[in-house]
Image (cartoon, grey):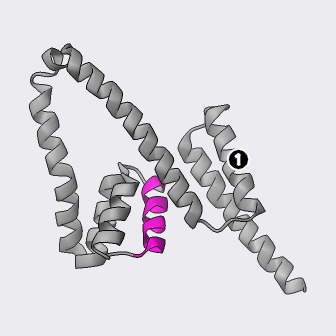
Amino acid sequence: MIPFMERETHEKHHWIDKEDLLDIVTISESTPGPIAINAATFIGYKTAGFLGSVCATLGVVLPSFLIILILSFCLDKVIEFKPVAYALWGIRAGVLALIAKSFVSLFKQVKKNIFAYIMMILAFIAVCIFKLDVVIIVLSAAALGIAAYFISKKAGEKK
């Protein structure tokens, strides 16, 4: 989703800049709901105000909703069809590649320092090894980031 958003909103239409995209991803990942809906609402509001946010949100939600509604009536029969099962398996592999691309793209944009690297490693360990809830990780990272800001600000005042 993130590479698509970057291509459409920044590269193709120039609605937002790269920093806005990074902010959108950060906010969308920190708030409840799918990233596409949160991002569409934000981009719609930024480009056309309240009405833009409503239209963008509906534009993202309605097509998927209608497709899922239609498929729900015949899902049992469709899922047993071997080509569909293999297609879903292929889609999972494609999604993994897109997530990796998004990680690399976002990693290139983020300011890098020792604190950022430590936070990245700690978050990875917390998710993969300790299976901590993402909300706890996001809130902890935010608290540590705020603490690091004030510590660096205080250290700058002493110089």
Compared to residue 91, the image places residue 141 above or below, namely below
Magenta stretch, main secondary structure class: helix
In this rendered view, identify the residue nearer to me: 103 or 37: 103
On whether residue 137 falls in the magenta region, the answer is no
Q: Which residue is mark 1?
A: 121
For image coordinates 62% across by 34% down, the residue present is: 128
Quadrant of the image occupied by residue 38: bottom left
Read off the magenta span: 17-29
For image coordinates 19% across by 44% down, the residue present is: 64
In this rendered view, identify the residue nearer to me: 33 or 120: 120
Quadrant of the image occupied by residue 52: bottom left
For image coordinates 17% across by 57% down, the residue present is: 59
State the image coordinates of residue 46 (x, y, percent, origin top left).
Answer: 31, 76
State the image coordinates of residue 127 (x, y, percent, origin top left).
Answer: 61, 37
Image check: 19 left or right of 7? right
In this rendered view, identify the residue nearer to me: 34 or 90: 90
State the image coordinates of residue 2 (x, y, percent, origin top left).
Answer: 40, 55
State the image coordinates of residue 85 (x, y, percent, origin top left).
Answer: 27, 20
Q: Amino acid at mark 1?
A: Ile
Q: Secondary structure at mark 1?
A: helix
In which quadrant of the rendered image does the C terminus lie? bottom right
In this rendered view, identify the residue nearer to me: 139 or 106: 106
For image coordinates 30% across by 55% down, the residue present is: 37
Compared to residue 77, the image places residue 48 above or below, namely below
Quadrant of the image occupied by residue 90: top left
